[in-house]
Structures are given as C-alpha cells and as structure tokens.
Amino acid sequence: MTKKWKLALISGIILISSFLIYWFFLANPTPFLSDEDIIKEIHALNPDANIKNIQDKIFLNDSHVFVPHLSEEARYGASYWVWEMHRWKLVIDETSSSPNVWRIDPKDPSTHFLVWNFHPDDKQDSLSFFFIKERGFQVSDGVETYEPHIQLEHSVSMDSKSYGVQRIPSEWITVLRNYSQLDTRKVPNSFIQEFLPNYSMYFGWILYDVDGKEHSPRHSTNGSTYHADHDEVIDFVRILNEVELE
C-alpha cells in the first residue's frame, strides 16, 4: 500500500469515527415520541401495563423526560426516558409512582429532581418534601465531633394535577454541596442513607389532605417497577410520618 493510500485510509477512518461519535453522542435530540410510540415502548417493556393515555411529557432538560400515564385499571404510573445513542430510550416504567428523586448527574445536586404521580383517590391537597440529616457523634484520635440534626421542608400544592416535577430546593443543594466538599470519595448510586458515606442523609415526604391532616396514600404506593438496561440514578424517596420529624 502506497503512502498516498495509507493517508487516504487513515483520513477515511477519522472521518467515519468523527461522524459516528457525533451521531451517537453529540447530535441534538430529535423531537420526542408520540403518545402512540410511547405506549408501544412501555408495552414492550411491560406487556401488562395496559396504558390508557399519556398524561403529560415533562422535560427535565433536553435529554431527560418524565412521562406520567394512566392505565385502563386506573393505575397512575410514570415512565422515565433519556436521549441515548441517537434515540429516545425508555429506562424505567412504574405502574404507580410515589415520589422518586431522579439524579441526572449524581455528583451535582442542582440536577436532582423530585417526580411523582399520585392516584386521585388518595385525596391529596399538598405534598411536603423533607431533607433530613441525622445527628451524629464520633471520636477519632481523641477528637470528638458532633454533627447536628438538619431538617428542611419544602411544600408543594397539588392543584388539579396528580403528577409533578420539582427541582430540589436551592437550600438543599447548598447543604449537599457543602457536605460533598467534606468527603472526596465517589458518590455511590443510592441516595437513601448513602449520599455521602459519613453522613446519614435522606429525602422523605408526607401527603396532606384538604384539612391539613397527614394522609396515608394507599392507592399510590403499591405498584411494580420495570427496568431496562440503563445507568440512570432514580432513587426511591422515603415516606415519613410526622412523629419521625423534629
């Protein structure tokens, strides 16, 4: 092979590689799927989903979409979608959807979103989210360290919709960033009790009825979750009781 042909071959490989990298990793997302295509993809992952209609398509950013849906059996669930390898991919589908936290970038709290879809029979009027860091005490090399209890609350009006998306509040983001600077180890995949290994932190929620009383969401917490192969971090948010709060 002559030098000229070698240069042409190398140039061709670089050109094709550049195109493939752009196509699969850098190209802007195409318009999101139609309701019919969404339902088809959900049924492929969960043949028993029996979706009646798509309630909404909520973009968390250009490449992450939360899709609440309703089944023929009146189950209020949700699916999670990402733009990956030049296509919209379904990563999780739930037949019911009590709150989860979708951590788009696990290391950046500003990209963490609370998402939910409650059954209307749970008679919700407002939803309170909590960020809690439990107090702690430890002794290391004769040095005593006390970590105070932190409890932050953020309330959301349910209005007329059963579903919603909420970026975690800025105050929570600040606290999480401050603690992350104290521990340089890799953030693990599960937020519950593991966001940072040295600190017991978690998110929680309580549902309230129109009278402002704590309400048990019996219709929204019993369901199934179907996972596709993915690397997204979507964590369960713990249901709380007022007696657990300080």
Image (tube, rainbow, N blue to C red):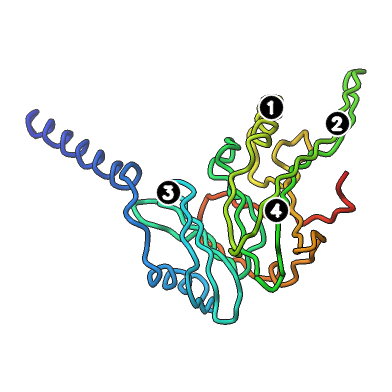
- Mark 3 highlights which residue? 63
Image x and y of residue 163, in percent: 59, 61
Image x and y of residue 73, in percent: 59, 81
- In the rendered image, the residue lying farthest to the top is 142
Amino acid at pointer 1 = Asn
- Mark 4 highlights which residue? 237
- In the rendered image, the residue lying farthest to the front is 211
- Callouts 4 and 1 close, C-beta under 8 Å: no
- Callouts 3 and 1 close, C-beta under 8 Å: no
The mark that comes first in sequence, 2 or 4, is 2
Amino acid at pointer 3 = Ser
Mark 3 burial class by Cα count in 10 Å: few <14, some 14-19, many 20+? some
The mark that comes first in sequence, 2 or 1, is 2
- Horizontal side of residue 187 vs 68, given as left or right: right
Real-space Cα distance between discs 3 and 2?
A: 38 Å
- Mark 1 highlights which residue? 178
The mark that comes first in sequence, 4 or 1, is 1
